[in-house]
Amino acid sequence: MTDTPDNNTTAVGQLALRRIGIDTYRENVAYLHRQCAVYRAEGFQALAKVEVLAGDGRRVIAVLNVVDDESLVAPEQLGLSEEAFNSLGLEPGAAVGVRHAEPPASMEAVRRKIEGERLNATELLGIVRDIAEHRYAKMEIAAFLVASGQTGLDRDEVMNLTRAMVAQGERLRWQRELVADKHCVGGIPGNRTSMLVVPIVAAHGLLMPKTSSRAITSPAGTADTMEVLAQVEMPPARLREIVDAENGALIWGGTANLAPVDDILISVERPLGLDYPGQMVASILSKKISAGSTHLVIDIPVGPSAKVRHMRDALALRKLFEYVGDCLGLFVQVVVTDGRQPVGRGIGPVLEARDVMQVLRNEPEAPADLRQKALRLAGRVLEFDPDVRGGDGFDIARDILDSGRALAKMQRLIEAQGAQADPPQPGALVREVPAPADGTVIAIDNYQVARIARMAGAPMDKGAGVDLLKKLGDKVTAGEPLYRVHASFPADFRFACALVEQDSGYRLGGADEVPQLFAEF
Amino acid sequence: MTDTPDNNTTAVGQLALRRIGIDTYRENVAYLHRQCAVYRAEGFQALAKVEVLAGDGRRVIAVLNVVDDESLVAPEQLGLSEEAFNSLGLEPGAAVGVRHAEPPASMEAVRRKIEGERLNATELLGIVRDIAEHRYAKMEIAAFLVASGQTGLDRDEVMNLTRAMVAQGERLRWQRELVADKHCVGGIPGNRTSMLVVPIVAAHGLLMPKTSSRAITSPAGTADTMEVLAQVEMPPARLREIVDAENGALIWGGTANLAPVDDILISVERPLGLDYPGQMVASILSKKISAGSTHLVIDIPVGPSAKVRHMRDALALRKLFEYVGDCLGLFVQVVVTDGRQPVGRGIGPVLEARDVMQVLRNEPEAPADLRQKALRLAGRVLEFDPDVRGGDGFDIARDILDSGRALAKMQRLIEAQGAQADPPQPGALVREVPAPADGTVIAIDNYQVARIARMAGAPMDKGAGVDLLKKLGDKVTAGEPLYRVHASFPADFRFACALVEQDSGYRLGGADEVPQLFAEF
């Protein structure tokens, strides 16, 4: 029961377009002067949604801000924030009209979801299309997400949501039958396996053009860490050249406009702390299908401070990944992994890149857990190759790594993407965090060490982070360092040290208290 | 499971405050130049929440917009939108700091509500306080509202929410034991009974200082309609003088800062079309308690196109009003009324004011239904007076109206508030909507006629609206006018006429098809 009488109005008056140098991120904003005749006649309210129309039919939806300052927008002008101006694609001074934006028709479906009903493919497509066209305010997106999470999305709803998200963006096509990919559902710091799996798989000859994200709430994403070594932002055409030459790449996926609705949903889910399985599966699979992947290994770490804490949840998630993947023509293999503690030693872009290169170079101090996990995942990817016998993947991967072919491939990828002339170093402000007593490390809180690394400045400050010196099961004596905090800026350093004082993230105990892998199940 | 590492940071650097002439309504916006050292050091993201701090501890929470235009904000300045600037209360150029706003602590409680749990008084107070302090983004408010609506708020949650909303605003105090009020839950166009009840009750001698809202989604609120005749915006001190002299007033409540969180919640509920009983009760009762009322008549119209469609829903709502009112010391009487069609003839401020004055002047063409309903409600209010015998209220109200004392009181109220020198007239563009056939009016869709009146320009254009010539049960012949549309501006007029073509809102049928009052129950 709502009363939305503002449908069906048409543009009134013509205004001169002005570019306003304000970056409002994913929210388009239009600026009208309070004395603007159109504003007065139409009875727009500040923060109302308006539609700005060009003569050629181009249009953009924006939130209205009312301006009292003529130097910003004159009464006969209409201002648009940076992204909105760019997306309309007109020159300053172009004649535009403005009218009330019609409330998105698909909000009716959102209301049905709020009432607990099931949505069909058409309804989900309508919602996703309206979100893609910026017709939803963030609060409307929040309503959809919370309602979907509370009521739950069944597996066909997840599949239809995924399909709709793919349909609203670009899709990379690789002219190859087998395009491999891997993805981790997240939550484990230091888990930089992609930077090992891609060179191994590409060296073997399978296509693996990996588009990664930057960190959103974690101390580093694969794109942030790769950027320590090489450029990661490039147009799709350049990506294609690199992949044609090298069978792989490790780049930031943001330039390719893949499933852009996913980014919009994430921009609401993260601040609200929403983390529902259905939305996670739709998010990951829509990005992978859009990136042109045909075969995908999904890594689900399970552990007491991981995103997935129980094996039963991992199994339910696996079924959902498999179902949606099968429906949409993406072959999915799920691997459940050890999520009891961070992977490797470094947490933060520079420190993680160091770990990766140590493994590639087969250095003796290379973190064994990172190497083992990467080989296991690479092996599963290699087994997508019809010429590889089931069970042989791990050994092939190990051979590629041990022989130096993975390192050589990584060096060619770095060269092709553009090596960093002056790679950043670990932050010079260092604090060693000592063990408070003798004992054995029996728990490392993934969230807390990630939070400390973030507070120290990662990922914006690439050299900031945490370097773990002790891992689960290691014996320590009182005063022996557990890990080091690295930062570049004094303020960050202070904040991170204060957080360490509150809770180091480590727990010590008896040797018999170390939790066994998947012991709880 | 969320990862919010940005707590506990403190202000960095000092910037010069600048007032930015942009009205962002209820959303504070801060503007920083992209080259601003603080922006770069802190790694703020566009649309992040920041806290702006003055040296004396004053602070304001705002959403960040990043600016590339030095004429708007220089790198060493921090701009604030109008409302944010005013609420900080400093002079331009004052030194301010800025830091990441801590995520509101009460979001943990919102997440518990999303999980379907019950919230206690402390948690609800925390949520309401953080909303009052602008710590919530609209999407966070939407998450709270949708989660509350889906899971439901039990009656103690509604009570605690109401109490918290009262605690976050001003509270008027009248030094009288009995402060009467009335309120309708809404949804019925033309329902301007308050403008009759207040003069009747005030003429009788009871205190009835009525603070009303303007229309949000309807064609007119009581404040809009009263404004046709008199000023309705005044400071609380002037309101008090008028009430002391006249026992009553009919003003806009927006200047008094009563339960301001209610307005913030409404600004999210309306666009989302959320309309949950618990939130409605908290909204209405928090405003009334804040306005200092001790005795309240609630009007719940029931009908097929009313907000409440079934008697069982009206009864459940009555219990909830009574429970929360009793807990918070407000005596509530609920009256269920006829919501089958609009009340009176006029819909829109000028036309409704005309109806009211016709009733007050006892003119023969005065709409009988408006008169009867107002007398019934006024009678119930009068019976709050311990000196009035139960059952006598209606007759006393009728005597006051018939004798002209209500008219005289209204004229004094108009005089005291400030009569409009040049009252607006009905819009000069008029279309009569004819009956398509012979028959009897068997339905009038409250929503559709309200929508037509809105489209014609009401309430911004006070003369715009709909004037009903036929009501339920009236016999009509083909071509005879059912109602008139009034508008002042050609564009509005065209839109309204187009809407009439789609659906006139009237249905004709046989005389035996007129729905009986509460027939469905």
Image (cartoon, coloured by chain):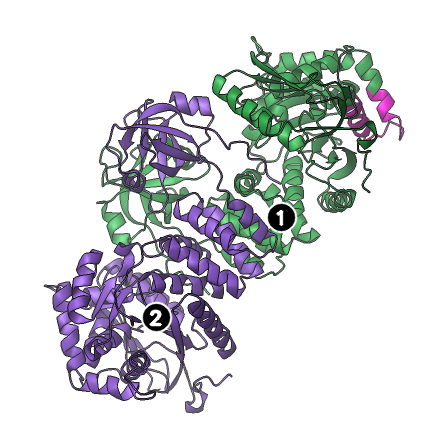
Chain colours: A green, B purple
| Disc 2/disc 1 C-alpha distance (Å) | 43 Å
Q: Residue at x 70, y 32 (%)?
A: A183
On screen, residue B396 above or below A189: below
Q: Residue at x 38, y 40 (%)?
A: A29
Q: Amino acid at mark 2?
A: His
Front residue of B405 and A495? A495
Q: Say whether residue A390 is magenta.
A: yes
Instruction: Describe residue B411's horizontal placement relative to residue A283 as left or right.
Output: left
Front residue of A316 and B80? B80
The residue to which callout 2 is attached is B183
SS label for mark 1: helix
Q: Position of residue B435 (x, y in %)?
A: 34, 80
Q: Tell me the quarter of the picture where residue B418 sits.
A: bottom left
On screen, residue B84 above or below A1: above
Regarding residue B205, the answer to whether it shows in the image is yes
Q: Position of residue A332 (x, y in %)?
A: 76, 38
The residue to which callout 1 is attached is A161
Q: Nearer the viewer, mark 2 or mark 1?
A: 2
On screen, residue B509 above or below A61: below
Instruction: Determine which of the numbered discs, if any, sits on residue B512 in the image.
Output: none
Regarding residue A24, the answer to whether it shows in the image is no
Instruction: Describe residue B179's horizontal placement relative to residue B107 as left or right.
Output: left
The residue sitting at the bottom extreme is B512
On screen, residue B139 above or below A210: below
Where's the N terminus of chain B, which quadrant?
top right
Which residues make up the magenta segment?
A371-397
Q: How dense is the environment of label 2, judged by Cα within 10 Å: few (below 14), some, or many (20 and up)?
A: some
Q: Tell me the quarter of the picture where residue B475 sits.
A: bottom left
- The chain under label 1 reads A
SS label for mark 2: strand
